[in-house]
């Protein structure tokens, strides 16, 4: 009977839709939707019950050092000692790795700028096809100059205009070159700043020079280290 029951066609039960008068309330909730909503509600109620129990059985004399070594920022507990969780050697190592990455990107951008500049320079400067003529006297020179001018006028009319797609590609290449030059400038400035910060973290007495103590005007701060005798 079980095999015959599986062979016979079964009726498809359709769920009732939302009545026309209740369309403003959205789709009609089915039983599976109710189960998901009920489980979520029960989970929240259990969490609240556990919190109430913890608050009821809390020891008023309980103390933890985390109470005075942390604070709440936007509802999240932040430890005050997070900034000093790395040693000085670890900070120096991370700073060196960051400087190496910036230096690598700087060198890569410089190579791309040089390559793009050489390509655009070769495209813009076409080889000249001029010739040098020698004349015996002034009259022959004037005659040769007039003939050359006529030839240039004829050749200029025969030259083909540059296609529009070539002009657009050239304009895009020049924009890319300008953007890469700006990126090189920014990376160079960032590399100098990171190198200075790394040197300031090293040992040794140093002080910041005033504007009247510097020999040449500088865009950033200038430091001077005290001389130490090397053994």
Image (cartoon, rainbow, N blue to C red):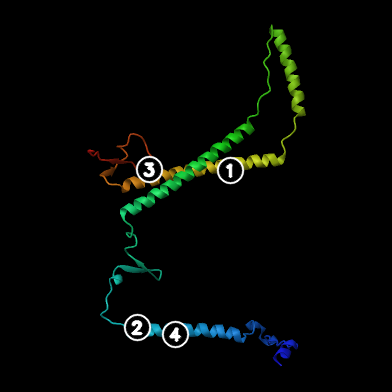
In the displayed orientation, state which residue is furthest to the top: 137
Q: Which quadrant is the C terminus positioned in?
A: top left
In screen coordinates, is 83 left or right of 155?
A: left
Proximity of marks 1 and 2: CB atoms separated by less than 8 Å: no
Crowding at dot 4, Cα within 10 Å, few <14 / some 14-19 / many 20+, comes out as few
Element assignment for label 2: helix
Circle 4 residue: 46
Give the x, y percent position of residue 201. 31, 48
Identify which residue is drawn at 35% across, 83% down: 54
Circle 2 residue: 55
In screen coordinates, is 3 left or right of 180?
A: right
Proximity of marks 1 and 3: CB atoms separated by less than 8 Å: no
Element assignment for label 3: loop
Q: Nearer the viewer, mark 4 or mark 2?
A: 4
Q: Nearer the viewer, mark 3 or mark 2?
A: 2
Q: From mark 1 to mark 3, how far is it between C-alphas?
A: 29 Å
Identify which residue is drawn at 38% across, 84% down: 52
Proximity of marks 4 and 1: CB atoms separated by less than 8 Å: no
Q: From mark 3 to mark 4, how far is it between C-alphas?
A: 60 Å
Asked if residue 122 can be seen in this view, the reply is yes
Give the x, y percent position of residue 151. 75, 21
Pick whichever of labels 3 and 2 is earlier in the sequence.
2
Crowding at dot 1, Cα within 10 Å, few <14 / some 14-19 / many 20+, comes out as some
Element assignment for label 4: helix
- Front residue of 19/97: it is 97
Q: From mark 4 to mark 2, how far is it between C-alphas?
A: 14 Å
Q: Which circle marks residue 220 in the picture?
A: 3
Circle 1 residue: 176
Q: Is residue 43 above or below residue 119?
A: below
Q: From mark 4 to mark 1, how far is it between C-alphas?
A: 60 Å
């Amino acid at each position: 009977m079980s095999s015959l029951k599986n062979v016979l066609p079964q009726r498809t039960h359709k769920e009732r839709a939302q009545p026309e008068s209740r369309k403003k309330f959205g789709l009609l909730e089915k039983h599976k939707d109710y189960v998901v909503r009920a489980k979520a509600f029960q989970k929240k109620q259990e969490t609240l019950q556990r919190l109430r129990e913890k608050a009821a059985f809390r020891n008023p004399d309980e103390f933890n050092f985390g109470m005075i070594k942390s604070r709440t920022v936007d509802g999240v507990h932040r430890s005050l000692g997070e900034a000093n969780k790395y040693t000085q050697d670890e900070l120096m190592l991370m700073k060196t790795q960051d400087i190496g990455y910036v230096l690598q990107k700087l060198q890569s951008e410089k190579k791309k700028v040089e390559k793009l500049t050489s390509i655009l320079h070769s495209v813009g400067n076409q080889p000249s096809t001029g010739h040098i003529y020698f004349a015996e006297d002034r009259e022959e020179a004037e005659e040769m100059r007039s003939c050359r001018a006529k030839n240039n006028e004829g050749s200029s009319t025969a030259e083909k205009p540059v296609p529009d797609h070539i002009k657009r590609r050239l304009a895009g290449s020049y924009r890319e070159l300008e953007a890469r030059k700006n990126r090189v400038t920014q990376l160079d400035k960032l590399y100098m700043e990171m190198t200075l910060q790394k040197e300031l973290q090293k040992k040794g007495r140093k002080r910041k020079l005033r504007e009247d103590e510097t020999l040449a005007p500088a865009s950033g701060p200038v430091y001077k280290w005290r001389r130490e005798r090397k053994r």
